[in-house]
Amino acid sequence: MRGNVAIPDQKKYNVIIIGGGINGAGIALDAALRGLSVLLLEKSDFGSATTSASTKLIHGGLRYLEYFELPLVRESLHERERLLKNAPHLVKPLRLKLPIYKHSARGSLVIKAGMIFYDLLSLGKSLPNHKMIWRVSRGKMEKSEPGLLQDQLKSIAIYYDCQVNYPERLCLEVVLSAREAGALTLNYCEVFAIGEMPEATRSVQFRDVSSGKKYQVFGEIIVNAGGPYVDKICGLLDPNIEQRIHGAKGSHLIFGKFENGPHHALYVEAIQDGRPFFIIPWRDYYLVGTTDIYFDGSLDRVSVSKEEIDYLLYEINHFFPDADITVNDILYSYSGVRPLPYEPDKKEAQVTRKHIIFDHGKHNGHRNFISIIGGKLTTYRNLAEECVDLICEKLNISDAKSETKAFPLFGSYGIGDMEKYRTEMAATYAESFHISPTLVDHLVQFYGARFKLVLDLTKDDADLKAQICEYNLDIKAQIVYAIKYEEAKTLADIIIRRTSIGTSACLGLNCAGVVADISASFFRWDEIRKKEEVEKFKERMIQLHLPDPLISQFVEE
């Protein structure tokens, strides 16, 4: 654990990456594996913004076929397959159903054609091909999805994509892999100035957010991977650089399971505006979303609006008529901003999801400064490869090829067949550590092969086997592991992005004190500081993740 920034003697790097979301992390890993010296700077925590606010899918992008973005869909499907192999503990197959009604804008034959293209563009995949259920009878549907709206239901397409339960963990494992490959990865380090030096080398000044201490480093290439903050970062170099990003907010609602709810994930055409959205079984909950609305507000305080809540509630109640879901049934919500290319004349859904690697030297004279525009969680690896190819070209490095196509991420080493690994580990480690097989399996799916290091912490302190919170299976050893080995710096880091506590029904509000008690000795907090940290965490979680009608109710409880 660094405390907080320990800059080595090296002050100059081949590449300095600003932004520690999935794209910045991927670029850091690819560059480090090619032998480049890499510094990754993130102003908050790794994967804490757009990355963690996704719909938790690794998918080809079925709806992009509608806009004839065949190369994007093909790339996404190939990257989906690679993630299944490179991160099998985090990325898993997901069966989806797409119901087609008489009023659907996209009829059965159109959907069937799209499914055929989807399968053709993913030839060689490990997932099954699609199938169609034609002329659905009420009896047949009630058997598989009894709660789904039956009226005017014509057919159902069944297809497969993938789910990543914890996209923030995927990002963290890419960061840790990059660090293991030689990159210096620093969270809570905010860049406040970018300058130009002789021979096109650039200076980057940043401050340690915790201590306020300032540092200056130098990079041959600067990569701006700030996601929705790209334009702000460009402004540090030149305030006259034209706008490149138009953020689009996507919001999601989390509900508890309800009677006759969906058994499988559903991809449904919204009755209000025809926009597709998802209803996905996730852990012990349902995840519903996403919205797609241009956003010009504060990027540091993004939360769901009343209009978005009303929109999603209407849709879920329409397609599950017996659900009778209200705002009081929402466990919590989350929102993020997609860094879409600036195309003001297009509607949100029409803006391309293809990433753009923008070389400023070719457009506005700012040599060796690259901005990443757009990008998807699924395609981060390919984006990173393309970006580092450009970096190597600029550095006149011709013999360094990308190694990430078949590179297992941090927790994937030695796993092989995931289902077999889960079974074997649950049996072996439940007995040797005197814990339940269910707990072992939970840790395996969260950490992959690294779960053993978490359990090793309990050998000298059996109390670390204790469950932290009644709403999930996480144990106290995970708190210690997060601080010692995963660069956690705050309560939010531990609760939201290093464990599953903060994405459980309680949002970590019930057990923040327990986490703080264990963390205090590592962070050197006294009682006053510990109390401040707990209150600060609770306040931010309530403001960002509880819709207004639920706030007073939760506080009263």
Image (cartoon, rainbow, N blue to C red):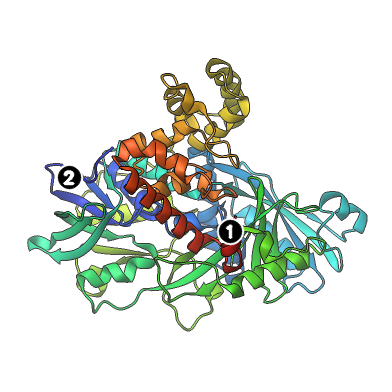
Name the residue at 56% across, 23% down.
425
Name the residue at 57% across, 56% down.
60
Please tell me whether mark 1 sits on a helix, a strand or a loop.
helix
Q: Is residue 313 left or right of residue 181?
A: right
475 above or below 455? below
> In this figure, what is the number of numbered marks?
2
218 above or below 90? below
551 above or below 20? below
Question: For this rendering, which residue is in front, 131 or 314?
Answer: 314
Question: For this rendering, which residue is in front, 112 or 526?
Answer: 526
Q: Which residue is mark 1?
A: 556
Task: Measure the C-alpha gap from mark 1 to mark 2.
Answer: 46 Å
Residue found farthest to the bottom: 345
- Closer to us: mark 1 or mark 2? 1
Residue found farthest to the top: 432
> Quarter of the image containing the C terminus?
bottom right
Residue found farthest to the left: 198
Whether residue 482 is visible: no
Q: Are marks 1 and 2 in contact (CB under 8 Å)?
A: no
